[in-house]
Amino acid sequence: MKDKRPEWIKVRLKGEHQLREVKEMLSRLSLHTVCEEANCPNIGECFGRRTATFMILGRVCTRNCTFCNVTKGNAQPVDPNEPRHVAEAVKELQLRHVVITSVTRDDLPDGGAAHFAEVIKSIKALDEKVVVEVLIPDFKSSQDALKLVVDAKPEIINHNVETVPRLYPTVRPMAVYQRSLSLLKNVKTMDDSILTKSGIMLGLGEREEEVIDVLKDLRKVGCDIMTIGQYLAPSKKHHPVVEYIRPEVFDRYKDICLELGFKYVASSPLVRSSYHADQALK
């Protein structure tokens, strides 16, 4: 299918001065953002608002998801100074809500969980009022690894299921749908004061009844916050866009989510996991 994007997908670049300012700061502190690495369509708006989603544990992912633009291959050494640098960036940007994500590090014994915990603690040490949201990998089902993150007390733990189970072999071949659901359930078991969050992309070839089943599955494990956005292929080498979903379909899924009991839902074509993430607690 020819990738000709409809009008509701097109984005105009905003905040070019702030965009340059934030990029310079990230370079100075040797930090990465998923905004840049994943080619997010909202980078101009978010950087213009002086917000960013920090990507820790390097730039190279050990998994081979076909939708993602992050570099894949042999992982880089973990930077021991990264927790302090992230905290400094949060302070410099005067963030009140910060999102921390990472590449998947299957090469590390704990999947990078201890590093996540150190980043959370470093941010809280500089300002305990900052709301910390982490978007974590599945840690290969290690409850010990997950507990390291939970015990660091982020306000929100996000783990995306990304798509419907039928499409996992082609979209997330190294992931397991039930494993992702179990992680979200285990967060609530360990500390039910932490909000859980997940997200899916549309346009990969899913059917409406499959999407609704995923939403029901997420509510069964106590997921509080849901994000739904349009999949955009980063290149011709990635999984193709099967369909551009119209805005009114996103609105319908939002209504279904609210009926199912999600506390907050962001559902529109340009929504991404951390897009306007701070709105969820307002």
Image (tube, rainbow, N blue to C red):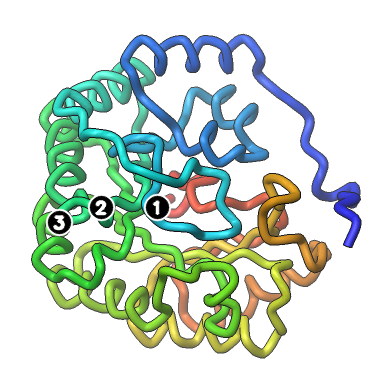
- Residue 111 drawn above or below residue 103: below
Q: Residue, x 70% and y 69% (percent of image)?
A: 204
Q: Distance between the residues labelled 3 and 2?
A: 21 Å
Label 2 amino acid? Glu
Q: Distance between the residues labelled 1 and 2?
A: 10 Å
Q: Residue, x 61% and y 37% (percent of image)?
A: 39
Label 3 amino acid? Asp
- Residue 198 drawn above or below residue 11: below
Q: Residues within 10 Å of mark 2 (few under 14, many from 20)?
A: some
Label 1 amino acid? Leu
Q: Residue, x 66% and y 14% (percent of image)?
A: 16
Q: Is mark 2 on a helix, strand or loop?
A: loop
Q: Give the percent coordinates (x, y) of residue 165.
A: 53, 82
Q: Give the percent coordinates (x, y) of residue 129.
A: 21, 36
Q: Is mark 3 on a helix, strand or loop?
A: loop
Which comes before the other along the chain, label 3 or label 2? 3
Q: Name the residue under label 2.
A: 155
Mark on residue 110? 3
Q: Do the residues labelled 3 and 2 touch (CB within 8 Å)?
A: no
Mark on residue 281? 1
Mark on residue 148? none
Which comes before the other along the chain, label 1 or label 3? 3
Foreground label between 1 and 3: 3
Q: Distance between the residues labelled 1 and 3?
A: 30 Å
**Between 170 and 96, which is closer to the camera in this rendering?**
170
Q: What quarter of the picture does the N terminus occupy?
A: bottom right
Q: Give the percent coordinates (x, y) of residue 63.
A: 41, 57
